[in-house]
Amino acid sequence: MSVTIIPNAINPAIIRACEAAWPDTTWNGWHRYKGATADKYGSLHHSLIPRACMAALDALAAVAANHIGESFIDYDCHAAGLHMMPPGGFLGRHLDAECHPIRPWRRTHSIVMGVNSAWNREHGGKLVIESNLDSQPDMSIFPEPGQAIIFETAGQWHEVKPVAPDAS
């Protein structure tokens, strides 16, 4: 398993600007995933993402480039972009798609970065990464603002544990 954790991956001012511009649940750029396998919001298209949030994604892509070899960042934001967990939200254990459904690209890495400075451990929402489906996770990572988590896509089961019902 290859996981890279980069604390303070991008300039804190960019994180603060992204957080200030972060869309609320009524934003027309969200797609709501709500069912047995997930309860979260994901951005629909990069053209709808607020500029400050795109600046954070661009900065993250520049940092990630040093850790993903010959790969490149999918600027079409297919299954990428912004994600948000509402109170009670979660993302069940899954594998990310390794093949782009529209273009003939192979996804080699998945990247996660925290933005919410008010988040604390009591809110939950840990990212759990497993290389197999035994009962022992390989890593359990609490989301910290500005912290980038980069992991190989192939064979890396992962999930986001439930967010507390009273988290904000």
Image (spheres, rainbow, N blue to C red):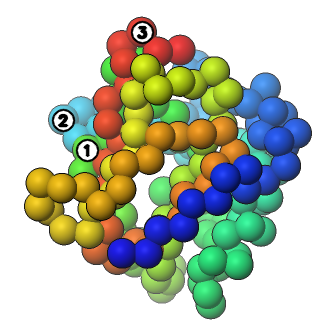
* Residue denoted by label 2: 36
Tags 1 and 3 in contact by the CB under 8 Å rule?
A: no
* Residue denoted by label 1: 92
* Residue 14 picture quarter: top right
Q: Which x, y percent locates residue 80? A: 55, 56
Tags 1 and 2 in contact by the CB under 8 Å rule?
A: yes
Q: Which x, y percent locates residue 72? A: 64, 79
View extreme (right): residue: 13
Q: Amino acid type of disc 2? A: Ala
The residue sitting at 53% across, 40% down in the picture is 143
Q: Secondary structure at mark 2?
A: loop
* Residue 100 picture quarter: bottom left
Cα–Cα gap, marks 3 and 2: 20 Å
Q: Identify the disc placed on residue 144.
A: none
Q: Earlier in the sequence, mark 1 or mark 3?
A: 1
* Residue denoted by label 3: 166
The residue sitting at 12% across, 54% down in the picture is 135
Q: Amino acid type of disc 3? A: Asp
Q: Is residue 30 above or below residue 108?
A: above
Cα–Cα gap, marks 1 and 2: 8 Å
Q: Earlier in the sequence, mark 1 or mark 2?
A: 2
Q: Is residue 32 above or below residue 108?
A: above
